[in-house]
Amino acid sequence: MTLLPDLASEDGVRLAVRATGVLAAFSARGVLAPADVAVARRLGRLGGESDEQVLLAAALTVRALRSGSVCLELADVDRRVLGKDDALVPTDDLDWPEPGAWMAALAASALTRPGGPLRLDDGLLWLDRYRRQEDQVRADLTARAVAAPPPADHARLRAALDRLFADVGADDHQRLACAVATLRWTAVVAGGPGTGKTTTVARLLAVLRDQDPGLRIALAAPTGKAAARLGEAIGEERLPEADRARVGRPEASTIHRLLGSRADTSSRFRHDRHRRLPHDVVVVDETSMVSLTLMARLLEAVRDDARVVFVGDPDQLASVEAGAVLGDLVHAPDLGGGAEARSGVLDAALDAVGCTARPDVNGVVRLDRNYRNNADIAALAAAIRDGKADAVLECLRGAPSLEFVEYDDAAALTEREPAGLDGLREEIVGGAREVAIAARDGDAATALEQAEEHRLLCAHRRGPYGVSRWAVQVERWLDRADEDGDALVDPDRAAGAEWWPGRPLLVTANDYDLGLYNGDTGVVVELPAPGGGTRPVAVFSRGGTPLQRSPALLGGVQTVHAMTVHRAQGSQYARVSVLLPPPESPLLTRELLYTAVTRARTSVRVVGSAEAIRAAVERPVSRASGFARRSPGTSSR
C-alpha cells in the first residue's frame, strides 16, 4: 500500500487542516491524503465514534483502497509514504497503535457492529461496501462451482477437439481449456503473452457453436482497446472452413457497454441480478485488469445457466482500482469444497473427450507453452515470475536478444543528456525516420507497422524517470537528428504544425462514434486530398485495413514517444526498452517488470541499476484481500 504522489503534495496536506490529533499527525507526514481523513471523520460523526485509533484505521482503509487493496490488513500496515524523488520514506516515528489494542478498539467500536460502515474479520478491516462485494463474488462463483454441470454431447465434443487440435497430444493445455470451458459453468484460461490464449478462445467458440449453433456469445474486456483487439484477433484466427463459419467475425465490447450504462447512476448498470444478460456464454479477456466492483456487477448480471470464461495473465499488473480478482481466483482454494473432485464427474467427462491433462481447482487451466516471445524473453519472464533475481540479471547480461544498460547511480539518468544511451537514441531516431518516410509516402500500413516496432516504457508518468521527462528527451534527439541534416521530420513539424506526417498518436479517451479507444495508437500520414494535393490523416490499426480519421474530429489524443507500463498492458511490440526508476520507487514491482518485458516479441533493453532489478523482482505486489481466506456468509463485525 503506497501513497500516490499527487495526494502527498503540500497543497494536499493543507486541505486536511481540519484534522486533529492522530489524523492531523499522519496527514502532515503524508501518510494520509485529505480524502482519507475526510472519510474517517465523516464515519466518526455518523457513528458517534471519537476513538482516534478507530478513525485512523478507517482512514488507512481508504488509503488501502486507493492503492488497490480491498481491505486493510491490520497486522501488516505499510508504514512508508512517498517522499521526494518518489522514494519511500519510513514513518515508524509516528504514534502507530499497538496491534492488539488496535484490534480490541475496533472490535468494541459501533462502526464495526452489524450494519455499521466497517467490517472487521480475522485481522482484516473493510469498508462495508467492499466486503459485501467480495462476499458476493465468492458466493456467485461458489454457486456456479457446486451446480450440476452444463449439458454437453461428449462424443461431439471429442470430435470437435480432435478436429481443432489434430496436431497436439491428449495432454495439450489449449485442448484442455476448451474442454473445461465446455464442461463447467466457470473456467479460467490463464497464461502469459504468446501462450495462445486468443487461439484457445477462437477454438472454444467453434467448439461451443458445434455443440449448439444457436448459442448467444458475448466477448468483453475491461478496456475498449482490449475489446477491439480481442474481436480482431478472433476474426483472424485460422480455423477449418466449417468452424470459421460457426464462429464468424464476432464483435467484442467493454464490460461496461455489455452491462449497459444508466443515466441515473454511474455505479450500477441496466443488467443486474433482476435483469440478467441474455447471453449463453460470456468470455472476458484481460481479466487481470478487472476490479472487484466491476467483477461483482458482471457476475450478478450473468444468468446461472450461462458459461463464463475468464481469460488473462494473473502475473501481470492488476486493475488500477481495488481488487485483483483473477489472481484471487487462481490462487483460491476449491470454491466447490472439493465436491467436483469427490464426484469425479469432470474427470470422467475429460476422459470421455480425450483429455489426459487436468485443470487446477476452480477450473483454472494454465497455458505454459510460448508461441510468440523468443526463448530469451521467455526465460527472462519466467525468472521474474519466479522471483529469481540472480537468474534475471544473468539473463539480461548474457542472452543475445536482451540488453542491460547498467547505471550504478540512477541519478545519472536525470541529467539533461544521460551518457551510455546511444543504442536507445539510435533505435528511437531510426524508427522515427522509417515512420516519417512511410507517412510522407502515404503508406499507412507501413507507417503503423514501423510505429509498433519499438516502444520506450517507464514505470512513472511524471518525474525524472517518467514518461513526461523522457518524451522531452526523445524530442531533443529528434530535433538534433533534423538539425544534422538527417531529413528525419517534415518541415511542418519544425514549423510547429500540429498534424505533421509521422507524428505518433496516443488516444487518451474512448470515442465510440469514431471507433477509437483509450490506449489506441496511430500515426499521421499524408494521403491524397479529394480536390488534389495531399492532406494529413490520422490512421490507426484495425485488422488488415487501417482505420482513417480526420484530425479535425480527434479530441483526446497526444503525441506518444514513451508510455507507462500500465498503459502498454495488453499491447505487443517487436522490441521494448524499459527505463527503471531507483530501487526505492514503490512502483517498481515484480508485476511491473514482468509486464514490461513481456510486451516484446524479439528483444528487450532494460535501462537501470542491478539494485533496481533486484528490488523489482523481490517486491511482488501485495493487495490485501479476504477472498481466499473467508467463506461466503461468514459472520463478521
Image (cartoon, rainbow, N blue to C red):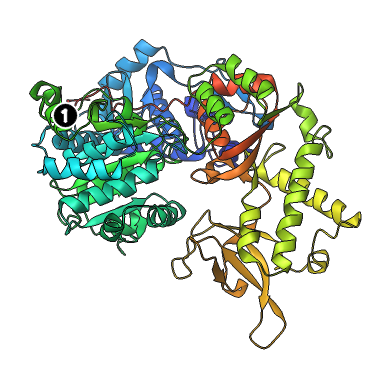
Q: Is residue 327 visible?
A: yes
Q: Is residue 531 above or below residue 629?
A: below
- Could you say whether the residue bearing mark 1 is in a helix, strand or loop? helix
Q: In the displayed orientation, state which residue is furthest to the front.
A: 167
Q: Is residue 122 above or below residue 495?
A: above
Q: Quadrant of residue 264?
A: bottom left
Between 499 and 113, the residue placed more toward the observer is 499
Give residue 430's position: percent from left, percent from top: 77, 50
Look at mark 1 in the image and give the residue it sits on. Answer: 351
| Quadrant in the rendering for residue 192 | top left
Q: Amino acid at mark 1?
A: Asp
Whole-percent x and y of residue 636? Answer: 21, 25
Q: Is residue 40 left or right of residue 618?
A: left
Residue visible at 20% across and 57% down? 216
For the point 38% across and 19% down, the residue is 74
| Quarter assignment of residue 330 | top left
On the image, the x and y values in percent for residue 630 come to 23, 24
Position of residue 532 measured from the top left corner of the image (x, y, whole percent): 70, 86
Q: Is residue 61 left or right of residue 586?
A: left
Query: Taking the image as drawn, is residue 459 in sight?
Result: no
Specify the farthest residue to the right: 484
